[in-house]
Amino acid sequence: MNKFAQLGTDIAKLWTKYGSAYISGIENTLILALVGTVIGCLIGFLCGVLNTIPYGKNDPPIKRFVLGLVRVIIRIYVEVFRGTPMVLQAVFLYYGLPYFSNNSIRFTSVWAAAIVVVSINTGAYMAESVRGGIISVDPGQTEGAKAIGMNHVQTMTSVILPQALRNIMPQIGNNFIINVKDTSVMFIIGFPDFFAAHRSAVGASYLYFPSATVEMAGYLTMTLLASFLLRWVEKRMDGGSSYELVQADQLTMTAGTYSHPDRGSPFDERSTELYSEGEKEA
Amino acid sequence: MDQNILEIRHLSKSFGKQEVLKDIDFSVREGDVISIVGSSGSGKSTCLRCINLLETPTSGEIVFRGVNVAGRGTNANAYRAKVGMVFQSFNLFNNMTVLENCMAGQIKVLRRSKAEAREHALNFLGKVGMAPYINAKPRQISGGQKQRVAIARALAMDPEVLLFDEPTSALDPEMVGEVLAVMRSIAKEGMTMLVVTHEMAFARDVSNRVIFMADGVICEQGTPEQIFTAPQQERTREFLSRFNAG
């Protein structure tokens, strides 16, 4: 018990001295993870849509070539950024650009560099998730959209992607939580995140373990909160399990009803016929 | 009104080495209600899917109002907007309510205003008896109701031809009736319809022409009286005898 009391006083000591640094670290971590995940998702959706544009033997050669090239480029992007550590990607971008361009091209803020690295990294993972999400939507949905004349973009934006998004929400949540934790590697380019606060705190106080305890508790709180929020968002997306019957005639007083006289009378006759037949069968 | 809306000329379709449709030839006049019957695997659905360009024909022409739409460089989307399709598996958009399902195509493809699309959709949903359910999602309604919504969705696009691909095959017997009733009333309206169906009573009573398909070819076609009372081909007689017996 003695040790726990010791730990408590050490943490208290750390908190009074570096509390604000920890707090601002948490803020930066959350902002970076959130922005990186959102931009990464957008990249992922773009790649997913480009990747699934259908083309066949009957399309002109130019279209087939361009679409084929796009698929190859996306494939390379995914394999490279999914297959290398984010910490090295950060180093490559932050230090590599000025190295090769004699300092003429470089990130002037660590924020920009960190957001770019986290976004393209997340994008590489999301590209595959989105592709999976699109594939998992019933092909009948595409046929239904095609049959009423929608083109590929319209089909994607109004029918397929909303359903794919719902299907990959758990994946997006995964990525967000991974980003909350893995942005800790951004200390390598001097990004002031939650883990950087730990490094500066222990550098001055030598209270390694107590500070790590603060970090553990902090990260766990963030990720638990994120899980909770994501579940809530998913529930919202699913909508209610019931619906309201509309009893009133929606068309009675609609402006413009009388501007289509050709639609009017024959249908009235038909709907009564339908109801009576329907009742008979029921 | 004696004009051909659609002419199918020498339509063939192969999946790999499997030749599913062989030299299909027929025309559709305005106001026609044509039933395509035949046993499973005879190519009925493939024929219909080729007409809507959901399958690319291997060879042959599909002439819609004088223009061959099966060739290269035709705008398949513009053509599909004028040719409605009702599927066996309904294919309602799961992410939308009943009303939104009927509005989406009008807004996105026909560029109608929201108010106009809504009014038009409600009009047709009323006709198929689904007006009370406009706020329901597809997963919350029954199969027969889904199919009625799918019909309203197709009608809301003001199509010139409406294709039905076994619209009642996924429904239990109780629900078949409500969907057929809707289809009857649309036919009475004068809508040009092409119906792939196993409902022989519908083919006999509602359509003005029946096409019997077997093994990827049109075996026999004619008026319902010709096909059902005096079939010329042995295959047709054989096929119909099972229905008459059952």
Image (spheres, helix red, strand yellow):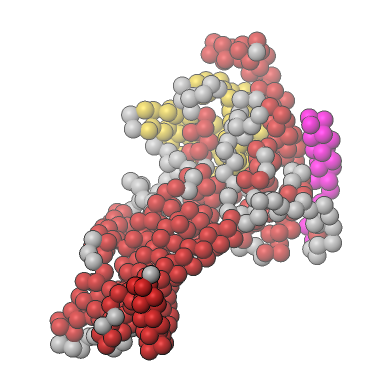
Q: Position of residue B118 (x, y in %)?
A: 71, 59
Q: Which residue shows up at 84% across the image and 55% down it?
A: A248
Magenta: main secondary structure equals: helix
Query: In which quadrant of the rendered image does the C terminus of chain B lie?
Result: top right
- Asked if residue B150 is positioned above or below residue B213 in the image, the reply reads below
Query: In which quadrant of the rendered image does the N terminus of chain B lie?
Result: top right
Q: Position of residue B31 (x, y in %)?
A: 68, 38
Q: Position of residue A36 (x, y in %)?
A: 38, 72
Q: Which residue shows up at 64% across the image and 32% down it?
A: B171
Q: Which residue shows up at 41% across the image and 73% down it?
A: A218
Along the viewing direction, whichever of B182 and A109 lies nearer the viewer:
A109
Asked whether residue B2 appears in the rendered view, the answer is no
In this rendering, position of residue A203 left or right of residue A272: left
Q: Position of residue B187 (x, y in %)?
A: 72, 37
* Magenta-span inclusion, residue B210: no
* Magenta-span inclusion, residue A260: yes
Which segment is the magenta one?
A: A259-282
Q: Quadrant of residue A105 in the image?
A: bottom left
Q: How many marks?
A: 0
Q: Quadrant of residue A108 in the image?
A: bottom left
Q: Which residue shows up at 48% across the image and 63% down it?
A: A227
Asked whether residue A209 appears in the rendered view, the answer is yes
